[in-house]
Amino acid sequence: MAEEAGLDLIEISPNANPPVAKITDFGKFKYEQNRQEKKNRKSAKVGELKEMRFSLKISDHDLEFKSKRVEKFLKDKNKVNIMLRFKGREITHKELGIKVLERVIERLNEVARPDGDIKAQGMSINITLSPK
């Protein structure tokens, strides 16, 4: 039938029972397939880098609230940069800031894994979390 029509016989699903074949122009078929792949790549979501800022004197409720927001970002397959900003002389107590970040990481350990260690940059310390 394909030869009579001057078209090609293309096997669509060889593993099906019975195998599925289609009579069409092979060039047109490849063109449509490439177009569909381009469309899928364009619409595929690329994970963004979100940022959440904390401070040294954050209350437990605020920490929980922000942690839930970070968890939502991670469930959407985004990376999250957690930054703790020091104000004034708070910079002399970096160990307290590290404890705050460790509490956040501990709370999110089910949905995230840290990328590297906690890094200090100027008046802040930060860490990047990736979704599991």
Image (spheres, grey):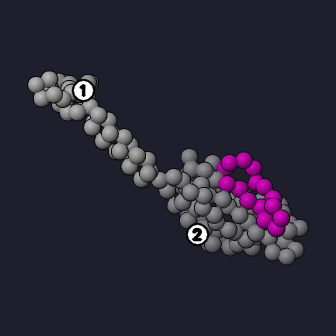
Query: Along the polypeptide, which appears first: circle 1 or circle 2?
Result: 1
- Is 49 in the magenta? no
Total number of numbered discs in the rendering: 2
Report the residue at 24% width, 26% height from top: 11
Q: Position of residue 89 (x, y in %)?
A: 87, 74
Q: SS class of the residue under badge 1?
A: strand
Q: Position of residue 119 (x, y in %)?
A: 78, 55
Numbered circle sitting on residue 64? none
- Is 125 in the magenta? yes
Residue bearing mark 1: 11
Please say if 5 is above or below 126.
above
Report the residue at 34% width, 45% height from top: 36
Horizontal side of 74 relative to 55 (left or right) equals: left
- What secondary structure is the stretch in magenta mostly built from? strand
- How crowded pointer 1 is (Cα within 10 Å; few <14, some 14-19, many 20+) is rated as few
Query: For the view shown, which residue lies furthest in the bottom direction?
Result: 88
Alpha carbon distance from label 1 to label 2: 54 Å
Please say if 81 is above or below 19.
below
Amino acid type, callout 2: Phe
> What range is drawn magenta here?
114-128
Q: Do the residues labelled 1 and 2 touch (CB within 8 Å)?
A: no
Front residue (pair 114, 4)? 4
Amino acid type, callout 1: Glu
Front residue (pair 39, 110)? 39
Q: Where is residue 16 in the image (x, y as percent from the top left)?
A: 23, 26
